[in-house]
Amino acid sequence: MRSPGLFQGRFALPLAVICLALSGGVSACSSAEGSGDASLVVEVQQDEITLENKTGTSLSKGEVTIVPMGFAKPFVTNITYMTSGSKQSFPLANFRAPDGSRFRRDVVNGKAVKVTVKDVGGKAYTREVPFK
């Protein structure tokens, strides 16, 4: 009679769960810094999102988007104007879905924050960071 291998018997499911958990943790660590232009500094806090402009030029227009998990529509707020080196805070209650509903942390789980802006010269900048 053969003894069960490592991936057979009562250890198969717990081993698979551990492997999935570890692979998810590794991928979460690799995306912790975000992607896109690092001259846009985005900080996600408990009740607001802060954007700092380190591009060296003024930003004329754009938007900050909370990308939710699942199939929900994104929540958006507009950026009108930011001078170089300035910092602007956006309360989470100011983010709206296309139907007009407000973003609420207790109802919707955010996946990422995406910032898309243009400077006064027309150059586009994007930055995406995880929603914490």
Image: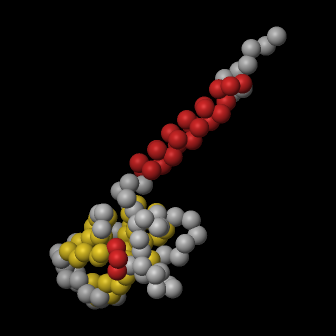
- Tell me residue 11's x, y (percent): 65, 26
Tell me: residue 44, above or below residue 84.
above
Q: Position of residue 71 (x, y in %)?
A: 58, 70
Q: Vertical placement of 8 versus 98: above or below?
A: above
The quadrant where residue 49 appears: bottom left
Q: Residue at x 50, y 39 (%)?
A: 22
Q: Tell which of 112 and 117 is nearer to you.
A: 112
| Residue found farthest to the top | 1
Q: Position of residue 20 (x, y in %)?
A: 57, 41
Residue 76 in which image quadrant: bottom left
Residue displayed at 45% across by 50% down: 28
Drawn side of residue 93 relative to residue 108, left or right: left
Observer able to see residue 102: yes
Q: Which residue lies at the image location 66% right of the left edge and 23% below the top edge?
A: 6
Callout count: 0
Image quadrant of residue 50?
bottom left
Side (left or right) of 26 relative to 49: right
Q: Nearer the viewer, residue 91 or 113?
A: 91
- Indicate left or right for 86 with 123 as reference: left
Q: Image quadrant for the C terminus?
A: bottom left
Q: Nearer the viewer, residue 87 or 44?
A: 44
**View extreme (right): residue:** 1
